[in-house]
Image (cartoon, helix red, strand yellow):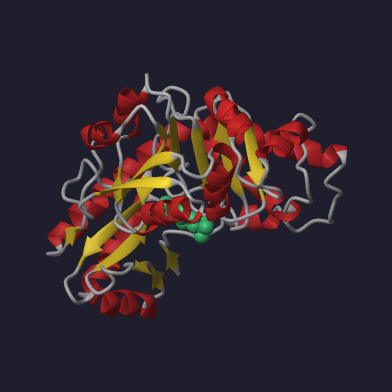
Amino acid sequence: MLSMMVGPTDVPKVVLEAMMRPSISHRSPEYRKIHENVKKGLQTVFGTKEDVYILTSSGSGAMETAITNLFSPGDEVIVPVMGVFSKQFADMCDIFGLDTKRIEVEPNDAVTPEAIAELLTPNTKGVFVIHNESSTGVRNDLKAIGEVLKDHPALYITDAVSGFGGMPLEMDAWGLDVCLTGSQKALMAPAGLAFIALSKKAWEAYEKSSMPKFYFDLGKFRDFSDKNETPNTPAVYNMFALEKALELVAEEGIEQIYARQEENTRLLHEGVRKLGLDIFPKNDEIASRTLTAVVAKGRAKEIVAALADRDVIVNGGLPPFDEDVFRVGTMGFITNDNVREFLRQLEQVL
Ligand SMILES: *Cc1c(COP(=O)(O)O)cnc(C)c1O
């Protein structure tokens, strides 16, 4: 069985085993130690010195948290829409009554800093840029966009759910005010936890936000975080798993993981092209390093099913590209040899 999914990803056995233990109280010293370790591990991957808050939800819960904690109805925000997940952020902004300015980006392209600069006004309160659009396999240059936003009062927010832990992310150095992600993608932990970190500037916005919030009120998370606790019962077993997964990340080293992902991606691009297929993003530079969207005109569903018959699990494309595109995850524990094996199987299937 070779699982190259785009999330939830395969959870390593040692991570699963970390959950085979008696339950503990989330108000105990034992829990607090785990919470502290997890926060530290996450800070390294976020590239931040800011505190990281641990939410019991999937990634979308953290997206909603960013909106309800930092904005008020009527606030003007910019959201480049490049696929299913960036569109979800734009739709959420609408639902919460923000004045959403969408940038409709070509689906096989990244958003440019210029396109964002063009829409910025003195009233812009937030700019939501996805790190890695999981539906199209396109990544954005968050650093370059950070340069454009550096002297503007708007908050710079990223959904890093599918890039986090697999592609470089430097929250502090790139000037990001809000960074959020989930547990079930490159972190190779079970689904069920989401993480969010805020800059000082984001905390100032929190004070002004008039949006209702209760369960996801980050002010409460901040108070409890000082004690290494959460306001309500956290998913304690997911925390056991996550602590272990972050240990694996630290053992390999985050820079080595990025390098492995880079090599995985290079091998995949080269391999699929040799087989007469292509990648969906318009060039290699903007292509994701945690998942690859492969174009197989009209044959995508058939190929995914035939691979599954051989115990090779990859994901189909998302509408409107589900007939023509399938997606191969390299995030998590995928090695160069796994990629070579995948390409051998794909060759057989074709
Ligand atoms: C998976 C994903 C999400 C969140 O999905 P959940 O199912 O809520 O965890 C958000 N953004 C991106 C880019 C994703 O890949």
Tell me where residue 322 sits by quadrant: bottom left
* Residue 292 pos. (x, y %): 30, 55
Quadrant of the image for the C terminus?
A: bottom left
Is 153 or 349 nearer to us in this picture? 153
* Residue 342 pos. (x, y %): 32, 63
Is 19 or 94 nearer to us in this picture? 94
Tell me where residue 198 sits by quadrant: top right
Say if residue 8 shows up in the picture: no
Tell me where residue 163 sits by quadrant: top left
Label total for image: 0
> Who's the residue at 15% across and 64% down the image?
277
* Residue 146 pos. (x, y %): 35, 27
Is 45 or 128 nearer to us in this picture? 128
Q: Is residue 232 above or below residue 296?
A: above
Q: Is residue 56 above or below residue 297?
A: above
Is 322 or 12 nearer to us in this picture? 322
Q: Residue furthest front?
A: 74
* Residue 75 pos. (x, y %): 46, 40
Q: Is residue 53 above or below residue 134?
A: above
Quadrant of the image for the N terminus?
A: bottom left
> Who's the residue at 41% across and 45% down the image?
99
